[in-house]
Amino acid sequence: MPAFLHAQELYVSTEPASNMAANSFGFRVTNRFFKMEHEGVTGMRIEPELMWGISKKLMVHVVGLASNQMQPSLRFEGGSVYAKYRFLSNDDVQSHFRMAAYVKGSVIDNPFVPAMREGAVKPYDNQELDLEGGASGVSGGIIATQLIHKLAVSATVGYNRFMNNTKDNLPDYLSANAVNYSLSAGYLLLPRSYRSYDQTNLNIYVEFLGKTNTDAVGRNQYLDVAPAIQLIFNSSTRLDFSYRTELFGDMSRNVFNTFTLRFEHNIFNISTKRK
C-alpha cells in the first residue's frame, strides 16, 4: 500500500502519528526563506533529508542543515536525527486514530549571536532557539492523529532541551528548556474520487505552531500559523508550498515570517524477504 494513500496527513510543518510505509526509503530537500529582522535582508536555510521506513511502526530521518542566518554566507551548520515510533493504531473504513512518540537530537556549530554585519538595521535580539540550526539539543514528545475520510487533524506536544553548540556556549539569558505544541489540519481537495494511485493529489493545510520558553530567565511564548498547499504525483513524489507567520506572542525573535518550498520522493519495497 503506498505511503501517500492518506495524503492529507502529510503535513508540511509537523509530522503525523502515521509512519511512512515499511520497507521504504525517501529523500527530500527543504528550502526556507525568511526576513532576518536585525539586518532587514532575506536569509535562506537548505535541509537535505534522508528517510527510512524501518517497519510499519518505526521510521528514522537524518537531516543536514546549511544556512546564512548566523554566518555571513551560506555554510554547513550541523545536522539532526529524528525517530518516530507508532504505538497505537485504531483503523476503520475511511478513518483511523493513531498515536506515536518521537525523539530528536541535533548537533549545531553556529554561534548563538551572529557578528553584526554591514547593513544591520537594529541590534540582534532573539530569544527563540530551535534544533534546526539554532542550538544543539534533544527533544521528545507525543503525536495524535485522527483521519476521517478526507480530513486529517493532528496534535503534538513536546519538550525541548537546548545545549551548548560545538563552538559556542549557551548564554545564560536564553532559556535552555521549552515546550512546543501544534495543531494541524489537512484536507484532500482533489481528486474527488480515487480511480488509481497515478492520480495527482491536491491537499490544503493549516497548522498552528506554538512554543513556550519555561526557564525563569526568559519565560515567553508565541503562536504561529502556517497555511500550505501540496501536490502529490504518482503516490510517490510531493511538492509543498507553505508560509508561516506569527499570530501573537511576547518572544523577541529574529525571524517572524518564513516561506517553505519542499520536494520529496519515496521509493517503496526497497528489499524483499527471501522465502
Image (cartoon, helix red, strand yellow):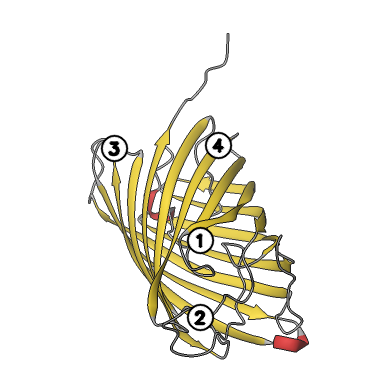
- Residue under numbered circle 2: 254
Mark 3 is surrounded, within 10 Å at the Cα level, by few (under 14), some (14 to 19) or many (20 or more) other residues, namely: some
C-alpha separation, residue under disc 4 versus residue under disc 1: 17 Å
Mark 1 is surrounded, within 10 Å at the Cα level, by few (under 14), some (14 to 19) or many (20 or more) other residues, namely: some
N-term-proximal mark, 2 vs 1: 1
Q: Does residue 15 show up?
A: no
Residue at x 63% of width, y 49% of height: 81
Q: Under tag 2, what secondary structure?
A: loop
N-term-proximal mark, 3 vs 2: 3
Q: Tell me where residue 165 appears, x and y as whole percent.
A: 70, 64
Q: Nearer the viewer, mark 2 or mark 4?
A: 2
C-alpha separation, residue under disc 3 versus residue under disc 2: 39 Å
Quadrant containing the C terminus in the rendered view = top right
N-term-proximal mark, 2 vs 4: 4
Residue at x 50% of width, y 32% of height: 24
Q: Does residue 114 show up?
A: yes
Mark 2 is surrounded, within 10 Å at the Cα level, by few (under 14), some (14 to 19) or many (20 or more) other residues, namely: many
Mark 4 is surrounded, within 10 Å at the Cα level, by few (under 14), some (14 to 19) or many (20 or more) other residues, namely: many
- Residue under numbered circle 3: 234
Q: Tell me where residue 270 appears, x and y as whole percent.
A: 49, 25
Q: Residue furthest front?
A: 118
Q: Under tag 1, what secondary structure?
A: loop
In the rendered structure, the answer to whether residue 244 lies left or right of residue 125 reads left
N-term-proximal mark, 1 vs 3: 1
Give the numbered dot on residue 53.
4
Q: Under tag 3, what secondary structure?
A: loop
C-alpha separation, residue under disc 2 versus residue under disc 1: 21 Å
- Residue under numbered circle 1: 14
